[in-house]
Image (tube, helix red, strand yellow):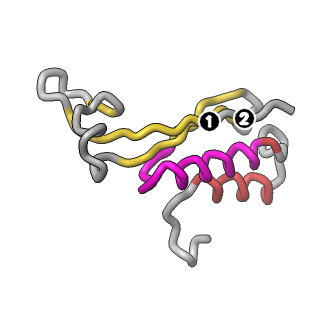
Amino acid sequence: MAKTRVQVSKRCGCVDEETGRQRGVTCPRLPVDDDHGSWYFAVQVRSLDGQRQRVRQGGYPDPEEAEAAGRALAAADRDDAGAGCTLGQWLARWLATKNALRPSTR
C-alpha cells in the first residue's frame, strides 16, 4: 500500500490591497513573524463516491498538529471510509478532520 503524502504549509488571511485576494502562503509577514498565520494540511482522500479529492484544512497552531490531523484523515481513508463505508467508518473519518468540537458533540 502506498504511503499517503501529507503536505503542511503556513497560510494567512491577509488581503492584497491591489487584487483584493487573500495572500495565503505568499504573505511577506509569514517568514518574519512567528505568530502570523496558521498551519494547514493538504491530503488526497477518497470522497464518499470513491473519487479522489484534495482536502485542505487549517487553523492549527503548529505544524506537528496539522500533520497529525492530516495523517489521521489519511488513515481513516485507508480504512475503507470511501464509497460503501459504514456509518461508524464515516464518523471516524469526520471526527479526524475536526480540530475544534465541543465535548458534547464529540
Q: Which mark is residue 4?
A: 2
Element under label 2?
A: loop
- The picture places residue 71, in percent across and down from the top left corner, at 67, 47
Q: Quadrant of the N terminus?
A: top right
Q: Quadrant of the C terminus?
A: bottom right
Location of residue 76 with respect to 19 vertically, above or below? below
Q: Which residue is mark 1?
A: 43
Q: Amino acid at mark 1?
A: Val
Q: Which mark is residue 71?
A: none
Q: Which residues are magenta?
A: 57-77
Identified at 84% across, 42% down, the residue is: 84
Q: Amino acid at mark 2?
A: Thr
Q: Earlier in the sequence, mark 1 or mark 2?
A: 2
Identified at 75% across, 49% down, the residue is: 76
Is 86 a magenta residue?
no
Q: Which residue is at the front of the view, 90 or 60?
A: 60
Residue furthest left as drawn: 17
Identified at 23% across, 32% down, the residue is: 28
Q: Is residue 26 left or right of residue 91?
A: left
